[in-house]
Image (spheres, grey):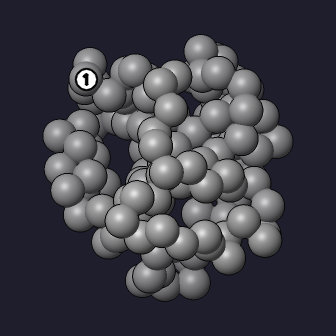
C-alpha cells in the first residue's frame, strides 16, 4: 500500500476518517480517539465513516488504499498512512499543509435517515450528527 495514492472522486469531501464502530483492539480505539482529537484541535471539518455501519463506503476507502488499517484518513482523495504516519507528519509540521484546504468546522457522522435516531457519540463532543452529508 502506497502513501499518497489518489482518488479524484473523493476530493470533494476533503477529510474523511474511516473507522469501525466495533473496534478490533484497544490500540485501534486509541488511534481513532487521537486522530479525532488531532483534527478537532486543528478545527477542520471531516466526515466520520463507520465501515461496519455503512459497508458500501468501505469500497471508497479500498479504491484509494486497499487493506488500509482503521482508522484511516483520506485528505483530498489521498491516503497518507496509518495513525503513526499521520502523527509523524504532525510532529514534523507537515500535517497542517495536508489538512489546510479542508473547511474549518467540526467532524460529523451522517446517519442513514431510516434510522431516525440520535447517538450517544454526541455526548463525548467533537462530532455533530447530520442526516444528510453536507456539500463541502
Say above or below: 102 vs 63: above
Residue at left offset 82%, top offset 42% = 41
**Left-right relation of 29 to 68:** right
Disc 1 packing (10 Å; few <14; some 14–19; many ≥20): few
Q: Is residue 25 visible?
A: yes
**Residue drawn at x 25%, y 23% as measured from the top left:** 9
Q: Position of residue 59 (x, y in %)?
A: 18, 50
Q: Of 72 and 45, which appears nearest the observer? A: 45
Residue that appears at 23% across and 43% down: 60
In what quadrant of the picture does the N terminus appear? top left
Left or right placement of residue 89 versus residue 37 in this view: left
Residue 86 seen in render: no
- The image quadrant of residue 81 is top left
**Above or below, comparing residue 102 to residue 115 in the picture:** above
Height in image: 71 above or below 79?
below
Residue at image mark 1? 9
Looking at the picture, how far across and down is residue 43, in whole percent?
78, 34
Q: Up-down: is 52 above or below 74?
A: below
Compared across the picture, whether 5 is left or right of 16 comes to left
Amino acid at each position: 500500500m502506497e502513501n499518497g495514492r489518489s482518488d479524484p472522486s473523493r476530493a470533494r469531501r476533503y477529510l474523511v476518517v474511516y473507522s469501525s464502530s466495533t473496534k478490533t483492539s484497544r490500540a485501534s480505539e486509541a488511534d481513532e480517539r487521537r486522530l479525532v482529537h488531532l483534527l478537532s484541535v486543528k478545527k477542520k471539518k471531516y466526515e466520520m465513516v463507520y465501515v461496519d455501519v455503512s459497508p458500501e463506503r468501505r469500497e471508497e476507502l479500498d479504491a484509494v488504499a486497499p487493506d488500509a488499517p482503521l482508522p484511516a484518513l483520506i485528505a483530498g482523495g489521498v491516503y497518507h498512512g496509518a495513525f503513526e504516519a499521520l502523527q509523524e507528519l504532525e510532529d514534523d509540521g507537515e500535517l497542517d499543509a495536508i489538512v489546510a484546504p479542508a473547511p474549518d468546522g467540526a467532524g460529523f457522522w451522517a446517519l442513514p435517515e431510516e434510522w431516525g435516531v440520535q447517538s450517544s457519540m454526541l455526548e463525548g463532543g467533537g462530532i455533530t450528527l447530520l442526516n444528510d452529508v453536507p456539500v463541502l
